[in-house]
Amino acid sequence: MRKIYLPVILFLVLSCSACVDIEERYSFKADGSCKVVYGFDMSRAISVLMNLMTDSVRATPEFAVAKDTSLNFYSAIPDSIQLGMKKEDIDLAKTSELSVKMDLSKKLMKVNISHVAKNAAELEYYLKNISKISQNSQLSSITKNKAKKGSIETQPLITGQDYYIYEVTPNRFRRVVDKIKFNEFLKKTQSTLVMAKAMLIDMPYKVVLNFAKPVKKVNNPKAILSADRKSVTLVTDMDEIIKNPAIMNLQVDF
């Protein structure tokens, strides 16, 4: 898919993300590698989006686009941004994949960003920097335009969740919410969250961690450990997170 299609896709992501199902999935392998997938499923939100748009907007070519494609994340970043990127960030982007399944006529909209980290150190670097790279890509350039009346400004919801402090070792996955950064996130997204709540829109959030060997310890009482002790699942929503950010703190020893 050429870069010309990315603004269309990301516009839809930003428009729908206040009512998106978000899932983070980590698959830790025996060799120390880990595949990370950030999934954004906006299928159930398409009808809400359509209700916000006028007939003239719905009739534009952008809303007739149907895509089922994958592309290298680096190739989706504008050339002007690529020139200013550090080597480490270039390598990170080149080893990440952006997958899109979109057909508005069928109310289908799913976006995945995936990456395979070779070891714990690479995974920690990825988790600490992927949000920043996304903010510097076309994700942020789209939102520089003034939001249309009645639209939902959601760029921070997709790329601004850098309020976690990560620690990843060969035997531990740990993240803690940075309260200062989280409060900054709430200030940036306040209007979006208020509008979403007024429209009775929720924002489910799910984290799944799969391991090659049994987990020794999980420190979050809300997290569910599978019967074979090889999978940890944490399910919540943005409303619950706002009330108690610590609910997203998670440490897994394995």
Image (cartoon, grey):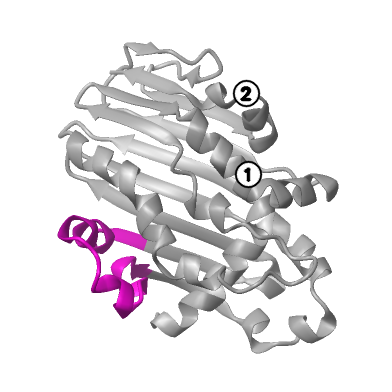
Q: Is residue 48 above or below residue 192?
A: below
- Asked whether, in this view, residue 215 is left or right of residue 17, the answer is left
Residue 88 drawn in magenta? yes
- The CA span between labels 2 and 1 is 16 Å
Q: Nearer the viewer, mark 2 or mark 1?
A: 1
Residue 21 drawn in magenta? no
- Write the residue at 45% across / 33% down: 208
Crowding at dot 2, Cα within 10 Å, few <14 / some 14-19 / many 20+, comes out as: few
Q: Which residue type carries mark 2?
A: Asn
The percent coordinates of residue 17 (x first, y second) are 63, 55
- Asked whether, in this view, residue 120 is left or right of residue 232, the answer is left
Q: Which residue type carries mark 1?
A: Lys
Give the magenta-colored segment's residue range.
71-97
The percent coordinates of residue 71 (x first, y second) are 35, 70
Secondary structure category for the residue under label 2: loop
- Asked whether, in this view, residue 214 is left or right of residue 223, the answer is left
Q: Is residue 65 above or below residue 211?
A: below
Residue 244, label in figure: 2
- N-terminal-most mark, 2 or 1: 1
Residue 187, label in figure: 1
The percent coordinates of residue 230 (x first, y second) are 36, 22
Write down the quadrant of residue 26 in the picture.
top left
